[in-house]
Image (tube, rainbow, N blue to C red):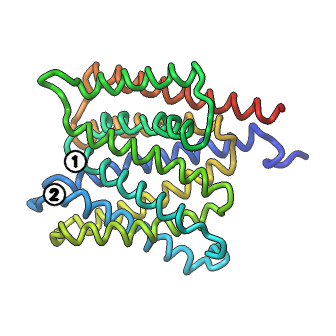
Amino acid sequence: MSSVSENPAARVSLAVPFMLGASALIAATSIFAKALGTDLGGAAGLHPFQVSAGRFVFAFLTLSAFLTVSPKHRPTLKGARWTWHLLRSVCGWLGVTAMFAAVARMPVAEATAISFLSPLVTMALAVTMLGEHLGLRKIVAALLALAGASLILKPGTAAFQAAGLFALAAAGFMGLEAIFIKRLSDTEPALRVLLINNAMGAAISSVAASFFWTSPQGLQWPLMAGLGAVMVSAQAMFIQAMKRGDASAVIPAFYSVLVFATLYDFWLFGVMPDWLAIAGGGLILSGALLLSRSRSAARLAGQEQ
Protein backbone atom coordinates (compact mmCIF):
# COMPACT_ATOMS: atom_id res chain seq x y z
CA MET A 1 0.00 0.00 0.00
CA SER A 2 1.43 3.40 -0.94
CA SER A 3 1.58 6.06 1.73
CA VAL A 4 0.62 9.71 1.36
CA SER A 5 4.28 10.68 1.34
CA GLU A 6 4.86 8.35 -1.65
CA ASN A 7 1.93 9.65 -3.66
CA PRO A 8 2.47 13.11 -5.23
CA ALA A 9 -1.23 13.53 -5.99
CA ALA A 10 -2.12 12.83 -2.35
CA ARG A 11 0.50 15.30 -1.15
CA VAL A 12 -0.91 18.04 -3.37
CA SER A 13 -4.46 17.20 -2.30
CA LEU A 14 -3.40 18.02 1.26
CA ALA A 15 -1.19 20.95 0.33
CA VAL A 16 -3.68 22.93 -1.74
CA PRO A 17 -6.35 23.15 1.02
CA PHE A 18 -3.64 24.35 3.41
CA MET A 19 -2.62 27.03 0.90
CA LEU A 20 -6.22 28.08 0.33
CA GLY A 21 -6.68 28.34 4.10
CA ALA A 22 -3.53 30.43 4.40
CA SER A 23 -4.75 32.68 1.59
CA ALA A 24 -8.13 33.22 3.26
CA LEU A 25 -6.40 34.14 6.53
CA ILE A 26 -3.88 36.47 4.86
CA ALA A 27 -6.73 38.31 3.13
CA ALA A 28 -8.50 38.52 6.50
CA THR A 29 -5.46 40.24 8.07
CA SER A 30 -5.87 43.08 5.57
CA ILE A 31 -9.49 43.45 6.68
CA PHE A 32 -8.37 43.56 10.33
CA ALA A 33 -5.77 46.18 9.42
CA LYS A 34 -8.31 48.26 7.47
CA ALA A 35 -10.67 48.24 10.45
CA LEU A 36 -7.86 49.28 12.79
CA GLY A 37 -6.59 52.00 10.48
CA THR A 38 -9.95 53.71 9.97
CA ASP A 39 -12.39 55.30 12.40
CA LEU A 40 -14.42 52.56 14.07
CA GLY A 41 -17.19 52.87 16.67
CA GLY A 42 -16.21 56.41 17.60
CA ALA A 43 -12.51 55.52 17.99
CA ALA A 44 -9.97 57.19 15.70
CA GLY A 45 -8.01 54.91 13.41
CA LEU A 46 -4.60 53.76 14.63
CA HIS A 47 -1.33 54.71 12.92
CA PRO A 48 0.04 52.00 10.56
CA PHE A 49 3.14 51.65 12.80
CA GLN A 50 0.87 50.86 15.72
CA VAL A 51 -1.19 48.40 13.70
CA SER A 52 1.94 46.55 12.55
CA ALA A 53 3.19 46.49 16.14
CA GLY A 54 -0.06 44.81 17.17
CA ARG A 55 0.37 42.29 14.36
CA PHE A 56 3.89 41.28 15.43
CA VAL A 57 3.44 41.44 19.21
CA PHE A 58 0.28 39.34 19.26
CA ALA A 59 1.67 36.94 16.66
CA PHE A 60 4.71 36.41 18.88
CA LEU A 61 2.51 35.91 21.95
CA THR A 62 0.34 33.40 20.07
CA LEU A 63 3.39 31.48 18.89
CA SER A 64 4.94 31.58 22.37
CA ALA A 65 1.73 30.20 23.90
CA PHE A 66 1.80 27.32 21.40
CA LEU A 67 5.44 26.51 22.17
CA THR A 68 4.71 26.67 25.91
CA VAL A 69 2.01 23.99 25.73
CA SER A 70 3.93 21.99 23.10
CA PRO A 71 7.59 22.05 24.21
CA LYS A 72 8.59 19.29 21.77
CA HIS A 73 8.18 21.81 18.95
CA ARG A 74 10.47 24.43 20.47
CA PRO A 75 13.26 25.17 18.01
CA THR A 76 16.86 25.57 19.08
CA LEU A 77 18.49 28.93 18.38
CA LYS A 78 21.92 27.38 17.96
CA GLY A 79 23.39 28.20 14.57
CA ALA A 80 20.91 30.95 13.75
CA ARG A 81 22.17 33.41 11.13
CA TRP A 82 21.25 36.53 13.05
CA THR A 83 22.25 39.08 10.42
CA TRP A 84 20.00 37.49 7.81
CA HIS A 85 17.19 37.20 10.36
CA LEU A 86 17.51 40.89 11.19
CA LEU A 87 17.50 41.97 7.55
CA ARG A 88 14.50 39.74 6.83
CA SER A 89 12.62 41.06 9.87
CA VAL A 90 13.25 44.74 9.02
CA CYS A 91 12.06 44.24 5.43
CA GLY A 92 9.06 42.25 6.63
CA TRP A 93 8.10 44.93 9.13
CA LEU A 94 8.41 47.70 6.54
CA GLY A 95 6.41 45.67 4.02
CA VAL A 96 3.62 44.91 6.49
CA THR A 97 3.46 48.54 7.67
CA ALA A 98 3.28 49.86 4.10
CA MET A 99 0.58 47.34 3.24
CA PHE A 100 -1.49 48.28 6.28
CA ALA A 101 -1.16 51.96 5.33
CA ALA A 102 -2.40 51.11 1.83
CA VAL A 103 -5.47 49.10 2.86
CA ALA A 104 -6.53 51.84 5.26
CA ARG A 105 -6.73 54.27 2.32
CA MET A 106 -7.88 52.19 -0.68
CA PRO A 107 -9.93 49.06 -1.47
CA VAL A 108 -8.33 45.96 0.04
CA ALA A 109 -8.57 43.97 -3.20
CA GLU A 110 -6.72 46.63 -5.20
CA ALA A 111 -3.96 46.98 -2.60
CA THR A 112 -3.65 43.19 -2.53
CA ALA A 113 -3.33 43.03 -6.32
CA ILE A 114 -0.54 45.63 -6.32
CA SER A 115 1.29 43.74 -3.56
CA PHE A 116 1.51 40.77 -5.93
CA LEU A 117 4.28 42.68 -7.70
CA SER A 118 6.57 41.40 -4.94
CA PRO A 119 7.57 38.23 -6.89
CA LEU A 120 8.78 40.49 -9.69
CA VAL A 121 10.87 42.48 -7.23
CA THR A 122 12.29 39.19 -5.97
CA MET A 123 13.02 38.18 -9.57
CA ALA A 124 14.91 41.40 -10.28
CA LEU A 125 16.88 41.12 -7.04
CA ALA A 126 17.64 37.45 -7.71
CA VAL A 127 19.31 38.50 -10.96
CA THR A 128 21.54 41.06 -9.23
CA MET A 129 22.06 39.40 -5.84
CA LEU A 130 21.91 35.68 -6.65
CA GLY A 131 23.13 35.69 -10.24
CA GLU A 132 19.97 34.13 -11.69
CA HIS A 133 19.23 34.33 -15.42
CA LEU A 134 16.59 36.74 -16.76
CA GLY A 135 14.80 35.01 -19.65
CA LEU A 136 12.06 36.09 -22.05
CA ARG A 137 9.29 34.51 -19.96
CA LYS A 138 10.34 36.54 -16.91
CA ILE A 139 10.47 39.77 -18.91
CA VAL A 140 6.96 39.16 -20.29
CA ALA A 141 5.70 38.37 -16.77
CA ALA A 142 7.15 41.65 -15.51
CA LEU A 143 5.58 43.68 -18.33
CA LEU A 144 2.15 42.09 -17.74
CA ALA A 145 2.25 42.80 -14.02
CA LEU A 146 3.48 46.36 -14.44
CA ALA A 147 0.71 47.05 -16.95
CA GLY A 148 -1.78 45.69 -14.44
CA ALA A 149 -0.46 47.91 -11.69
CA SER A 150 -0.78 50.93 -13.98
CA LEU A 151 -4.45 50.15 -14.60
CA ILE A 152 -5.12 49.99 -10.86
CA LEU A 153 -3.12 53.11 -9.97
CA LYS A 154 -4.44 55.13 -12.94
CA PRO A 155 -1.38 57.43 -13.13
CA GLY A 156 -1.78 60.79 -14.85
CA THR A 157 -5.52 60.95 -14.25
CA ALA A 158 -7.76 62.59 -11.69
CA ALA A 159 -8.51 59.11 -10.35
CA PHE A 160 -4.83 58.41 -9.53
CA GLN A 161 -4.62 56.38 -6.33
CA ALA A 162 -1.76 57.88 -4.34
CA ALA A 163 -2.41 55.31 -1.61
CA GLY A 164 -1.32 52.68 -4.11
CA LEU A 165 2.24 53.94 -3.67
CA PHE A 166 2.15 52.37 -0.20
CA ALA A 167 1.15 49.05 -1.79
CA LEU A 168 4.03 49.42 -4.27
CA ALA A 169 6.41 50.03 -1.39
CA ALA A 170 5.01 46.95 0.35
CA ALA A 171 5.67 44.88 -2.78
CA GLY A 172 9.25 46.16 -2.87
CA PHE A 173 10.00 45.34 0.75
CA MET A 174 8.26 41.96 0.54
CA GLY A 175 10.23 41.11 -2.58
CA LEU A 176 13.48 41.92 -0.80
CA GLU A 177 12.34 39.95 2.24
CA ALA A 178 11.84 36.90 0.01
CA ILE A 179 15.52 37.00 -0.94
CA PHE A 180 16.52 36.82 2.72
CA ILE A 181 13.96 34.06 3.37
CA LYS A 182 15.51 32.07 0.52
CA ARG A 183 18.95 32.45 2.11
CA LEU A 184 17.59 31.37 5.51
CA SER A 185 15.52 28.45 4.23
CA ASP A 186 18.67 26.74 2.96
CA THR A 187 20.01 26.19 6.47
CA GLU A 188 17.32 26.97 9.07
CA PRO A 189 14.19 25.08 10.22
CA ALA A 190 10.91 26.80 9.43
CA LEU A 191 9.70 27.13 13.03
CA ARG A 192 12.92 28.83 14.10
CA VAL A 193 12.60 31.31 11.23
CA LEU A 194 8.99 31.97 12.23
CA LEU A 195 9.82 32.46 15.92
CA ILE A 196 12.81 34.76 15.37
CA ASN A 197 10.98 36.79 12.72
CA ASN A 198 8.00 37.50 14.98
CA ALA A 199 10.21 38.20 18.00
CA MET A 200 12.38 40.66 16.08
CA GLY A 201 9.35 42.15 14.37
CA ALA A 202 7.67 42.69 17.74
CA ALA A 203 10.75 44.49 19.11
CA ILE A 204 11.32 46.68 16.03
CA SER A 205 7.66 47.57 15.51
CA SER A 206 7.10 48.36 19.20
CA VAL A 207 9.93 50.90 19.20
CA ALA A 208 8.58 52.56 16.03
CA ALA A 209 5.00 52.53 17.33
CA SER A 210 6.02 54.23 20.60
CA PHE A 211 6.47 57.51 18.69
CA PHE A 212 2.87 57.37 17.38
CA TRP A 213 1.16 55.65 20.29
CA THR A 214 -2.48 56.33 21.09
CA SER A 215 -4.38 54.13 23.50
CA PRO A 216 -6.53 51.59 21.61
CA GLN A 217 -10.22 51.79 22.45
CA GLY A 218 -13.22 49.48 22.32
CA LEU A 219 -12.81 46.79 19.67
CA GLN A 220 -9.28 47.85 18.75
CA TRP A 221 -7.59 45.66 21.38
CA PRO A 222 -9.34 42.42 20.35
CA LEU A 223 -8.87 43.35 16.69
CA MET A 224 -5.10 43.69 17.21
CA ALA A 225 -5.01 40.40 19.10
CA GLY A 226 -7.00 38.78 16.30
CA LEU A 227 -4.69 40.28 13.68
CA GLY A 228 -1.63 38.72 15.28
CA ALA A 229 -3.24 35.32 15.88
CA VAL A 230 -4.65 35.14 12.35
CA MET A 231 -1.34 36.17 10.78
CA VAL A 232 0.77 33.57 12.61
CA SER A 233 -1.88 30.92 11.81
CA ALA A 234 -1.64 31.91 8.13
CA GLN A 235 2.15 31.59 8.27
CA ALA A 236 1.86 28.13 9.84
CA MET A 237 -0.62 26.96 7.20
CA PHE A 238 1.60 28.35 4.43
CA ILE A 239 4.55 26.36 5.79
CA GLN A 240 2.43 23.19 6.00
CA ALA A 241 1.31 23.67 2.40
CA MET A 242 4.90 24.05 1.20
CA LYS A 243 5.97 20.95 3.15
CA ARG A 244 3.22 18.77 1.66
CA GLY A 245 3.39 19.71 -2.00
CA ASP A 246 5.67 20.94 -4.75
CA ALA A 247 5.89 24.72 -4.84
CA SER A 248 4.90 24.75 -8.52
CA ALA A 249 1.64 22.99 -7.62
CA VAL A 250 0.62 24.95 -4.53
CA ILE A 251 1.88 28.50 -5.11
CA PRO A 252 -0.79 29.24 -7.77
CA ALA A 253 -3.40 28.59 -5.04
CA PHE A 254 -1.82 31.38 -3.01
CA TYR A 255 -3.11 33.96 -5.49
CA SER A 256 -6.64 33.19 -4.27
CA VAL A 257 -5.77 35.86 -1.67
CA LEU A 258 -7.06 38.36 -4.23
CA VAL A 259 -10.37 36.49 -4.55
CA PHE A 260 -10.83 36.36 -0.78
CA ALA A 261 -9.89 40.03 -0.43
CA THR A 262 -12.48 41.00 -3.06
CA LEU A 263 -15.17 38.95 -1.31
CA TYR A 264 -14.34 40.39 2.11
CA ASP A 265 -14.23 43.92 0.68
CA PHE A 266 -17.68 43.53 -0.85
CA TRP A 267 -19.20 41.71 2.13
CA LEU A 268 -17.93 44.05 4.85
CA PHE A 269 -17.49 47.40 3.10
CA GLY A 270 -19.75 47.12 0.05
CA VAL A 271 -16.77 47.83 -2.25
CA MET A 272 -16.95 46.38 -5.76
CA PRO A 273 -13.84 46.88 -7.95
CA ASP A 274 -14.36 48.69 -11.26
CA TRP A 275 -13.43 47.12 -14.59
CA LEU A 276 -10.00 48.76 -14.65
CA ALA A 277 -9.16 47.29 -11.24
CA ILE A 278 -10.42 43.86 -12.33
CA ALA A 279 -8.39 44.02 -15.56
CA GLY A 280 -5.32 45.24 -13.68
CA GLY A 281 -5.61 42.48 -11.10
CA GLY A 282 -5.98 39.93 -13.89
CA LEU A 283 -2.80 41.15 -15.61
CA ILE A 284 -0.83 41.06 -12.35
CA LEU A 285 -2.07 37.54 -11.62
CA SER A 286 -1.14 36.46 -15.15
CA GLY A 287 2.36 37.82 -14.70
CA ALA A 288 2.75 36.17 -11.29
CA LEU A 289 1.52 32.80 -12.59
CA LEU A 290 3.78 33.02 -15.62
CA LEU A 291 6.70 33.74 -13.32
CA SER A 292 5.83 30.77 -11.09
CA ARG A 293 5.76 28.51 -14.18
CA SER A 294 9.16 29.88 -15.17
CA ARG A 295 10.57 28.98 -11.76
CA SER A 296 9.00 25.52 -11.98
CA ALA A 297 10.54 24.90 -15.40
CA ALA A 298 13.94 26.05 -14.18
CA ARG A 299 13.67 23.77 -11.14
CA LEU A 300 12.77 20.76 -13.27
CA ALA A 301 15.63 21.47 -15.67
CA GLY A 302 18.01 21.59 -12.73
CA GLN A 303 16.72 18.22 -11.47
CA GLU A 304 17.20 16.64 -14.89
CA GLN A 305 20.82 17.72 -15.21
Classify the position of the C terminus by image quarter: top right
Neighbour tally class for label 2: few under 14, some 14-19, many 20 plus, Cα within 10 Å: many
Q: Kindly state the secondary structure of the residue where label 1 is placed.
A: loop
CB under 8 Å between discs 1 and 2:
yes
Marks 1 and 2, the one that precedes in the sequence = 2
Residue at the location (65% across, 35% down)? 249
Percent of width and height locating residue 72: 67, 77
- Which quarter of the figure has residue 32? bottom left
Residue at the location (32% across, 60% down)? 52
Percent of width and height locating residue 124: 50, 35
Give the answer, above or below, for where 231 lies relative to 275.
below
Neighbour tally class for label 1: few under 14, some 14-19, many 20 plus, Cα within 10 Å: many
Which amino acid type is marked by label 2?
A: Gly
Mark 1 lies on residue: 104
Give the answer, above or below, for where 300 lies relative to 53.
above
Percent of width and height locating residue 302: 77, 34
Give the answer, above or below, for where 153 lies relative to 173.
above
Mark 2 lies on residue: 45
- Residue found at the very far right of the displayed protein: 1
Residue at the location (55% across, 58% down)? 236
Left or right of residue 26, residue 196 in this image = right
Left or right of residue 296, residue 205 in this image = left
